[in-house]
Amino acid sequence: MNIILEFFVVTFKVLWAFVVAAAKWLMRPKEKSVAGQVCLITGAGSGLGRLFALEFARRRARLVLWDINTQSNEETAGMVRHIYREIAEEAVVAAQKAGHGEEEVLPQYNLQVHTYTCDVSKRENVYTTAERVRKEVGEVSVLVNNAGVVSGHHLLECPDELIERTMMVNCHAHFWTTKAFLPKMLELNHGHIVTVASSLGLFSTAGVEDYCASKFGVVGFHESLSHELKAAEKDGIKTTLVCPYLVDTGMFRGCRIRKEIEPFLPPLKPDYCVKQAMRAILTDQPMICTPRLMYMVTFMKSILPFEAVVCMYRFLGADKCMYPFIAQRKQATNNNEAKNGI
């Protein structure tokens, strides 16, 4: 095709993409069904991972829960089983009203949850556990890479081992899980990969160099993977990047921005964050930033001079927002060492 003609075609497609995006923003797209599909969630034992598990359970997905903490993972599984029982009971009641028997309905609602203890920072542990999942459960259709850690130390005070662990859990693990489950998705041209990153993977702040590096890394991984799937014309495999602002899960307890600004930008409620992410996942939205203000912050960071960004950070109190959190973590560490007689 003549390059000038192709340029006009590309321009039209870009403009049309804006129109489609605006239409989706004005008219909420229909959510797809994940009923009966195998959904694997890492870091499912607590926080956002647990809430993702409950949301997918309500949509009748078959769940595979990974976490390094066996007890908390089983607690999440118990909550999921309770939801499954409620779904089955409601189905039986509805069937009886319609004149159908239990034996006709219950097999459709024979949902199960499977738990696996897995340290996603260890590559071989991921591959071994993934093979068990394929044999015991089946192929994974929805992969939610959610597991995450934070060291809570200034760079020069942070042990190398904690920096390495942050990078392994928050970034490298996404490589291992994706390599484990993507081949079958490619074969079937069907699947969905969800990357739970952070707004700190789009812009940074002081005191959490390892965490920001890991989240920037996983955002880059996700974007490159998305482009690779498009280049391979595997349109049946969807990707969603989740970048929330500070979420009130306790992970960053003590983090504070300027007190006059905080009422307008408080930490996100975990339930709200997950519900927004679920809406994005089920409508095949490529990226979701919560709240929407994060889109603007990212855009401004890209176009403003660095010194202008610094001025904005100082005005918002975002330049040292992590310092109280780091101080609390340090105090807690010192208290634990004192209790243990170290």
Image (tube, grey):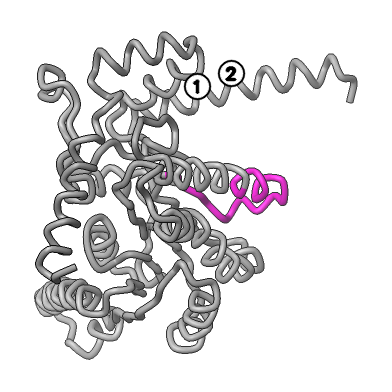
Q: Which mark is residue 35?
A: none
Few, some or many C-alpha atoms within 10 Å of disc 2 (few <14, some 14-19, many ≥20)? few
Residue that mark 1 sits on = 19
| Highlighted magenta segment, given as a residue range | 225-241
Determine the residue positioned at 47% across, 14% down: 306
Quadrant including the C terminus: bottom left
- Point 65% across, 50% down: residue: 229
- Left or right: where 335 falls relative to 72: left
Image coordinates of residue 224 in percent, x first then y, are 62, 44
Q: Amino acid at mark 2?
A: Leu
Comparing 62 with 94, the one in front is 62
Mark pair 1, 2: CA separation: 6 Å
Q: Secondary structure at mark 2?
A: helix
Mark 2 highlights which residue?
Answer: 15
Mark 1 touches mark 2? (CB < 8 Å):
yes
Instruction: List x then y, in percent, for residue 296.
Output: 38, 20
Residue 22, position in %: x, y? 42, 23
